[in-house]
Image (spheres, rainbow, N blue to C red):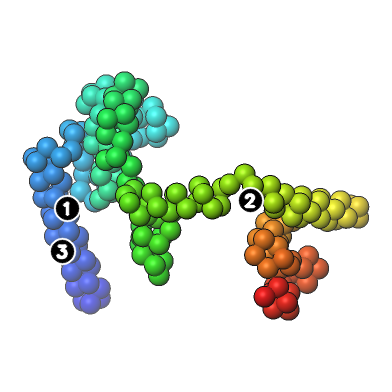
Amino acid sequence: MEYEILGLSIALLLWVVWAMRVERRHRRLEELGRLPPGPTWWPVVGNIFQLGLAPPHVSFAKLARQHGPIMTLWLGSMSTVVISSNKVAREMFKNHDVVLAGRKIYEAMKGDFGHEGSLITSQYGPHWRMLRRLCTTEFFVTSRLDATRDVRRRCIDRMLHFIEDAGANGTNPIDVGRFVFLMAFNLIGNLMFSKDLLDINRKRVQDSSITQGK
């Protein structure tokens, strides 16, 4: 019992220290003028409880009538700038589009290659523009998409055939999601290895097909 009380006291103390550090950080950002004003927030939870039970756009509209069309909300420890006016939004995305082009990248999204590894997790900048240019000129080209049209049509036709065969029995419900997943996975396999990677009957990866495709 004594150890439980001690552990709870230490956890409470750490929470108070963390909340005080976060609060000082919030105050410092507001004093520097880097964030627009907003409603008073609570430690740890921020302004989550002030959003209420109404839909988000209704809560944002109510807060905008009190704090203006542009305001700062803290969702936990994450700062969020909310724009509730189409005029202000047009001004922001027209004249400050480069500043607003970034986005929050979580650690779980980075993987082994960091946040600069892919087009999805890279921040806007020279590296992101280079990746986008490669996708535009190499992947999303009409000629390349047209070249794989027959492969896509064949995979979709096979999926529809499998669904018809499954519905012919009429005993068990049809798992459409399973057939769509098989179609998408085999489509990737045909584009990369010219082989189906999954067998609808054996429900496992065909290692021999991958080897032959290589």
Mark 2 residue type: Arg
Q: Are marks 1 and 2 in contact (CB under 8 Å)?
A: no
State which tag comes first along the sequence, 1 or 2.
1
For image coordinates 43% across by 54% down, the residue present is 131
Which residue bears the numbered disc 1?
22
Q: Inspect the image, locate mark 3, and give the three-letter code of the amino acid beneath it.
A: Leu
The three-letter code of the residue at mark 1 reads Val
In this image, 51 relative to 210: left or right?
left
Q: Are marks 2 and 3 in contact (CB under 8 Å)?
A: no
Q: Is residue 46 above or below residue 86?
A: below
Residue 87 drawn at (x, y percent): 31, 20
Question: At x 27% / y 30%, what residue is drawn?
Answer: 95
Frontmost residue, 137 versus 125: 137
Residue 106 at x, y percent in the picture: 36, 57
Observer-side mark, 1 or 3, equals: 1
**Mark with earlier residue (1, 3):** 3
Residue at the disc numbered 3: 13
- Tally of marks: 3
As measured in the structure, the alpha-carbon distance from the residue carrying label 1 to the one carrying label 2 is: 51 Å
Q: Secondary structure at mark 1?
A: helix
Whole-percent x, y for residue 6 in the image: 19, 73
Q: Is residue 192 above or below residue 179?
A: below
Q: Which mark is residue 144?
A: 2
Q: In 3D space, how far apart are the residues under numbered discs 2 and 3 (Cα atoms)? A: 60 Å
Spatial separation of the CA atoms under disc 1 and disc 3: 14 Å
Q: Nearer the viewer, residue 37 or 148?
A: 148
Query: Residue at left 17%, top 59%?
Result: 18
**Left or right position of 131 against 94:** right
Q: Earlier in the sequence, mark 2 or mark 3?
A: 3
Question: For residue 17, which quarter of the picture?
Answer: bottom left
Q: Using a 10 Å C-alpha cutoff, classify the residue at mark 1 as few (fewer than 14 neighbours), some (14 to 19) or many (20 or more).
A: some
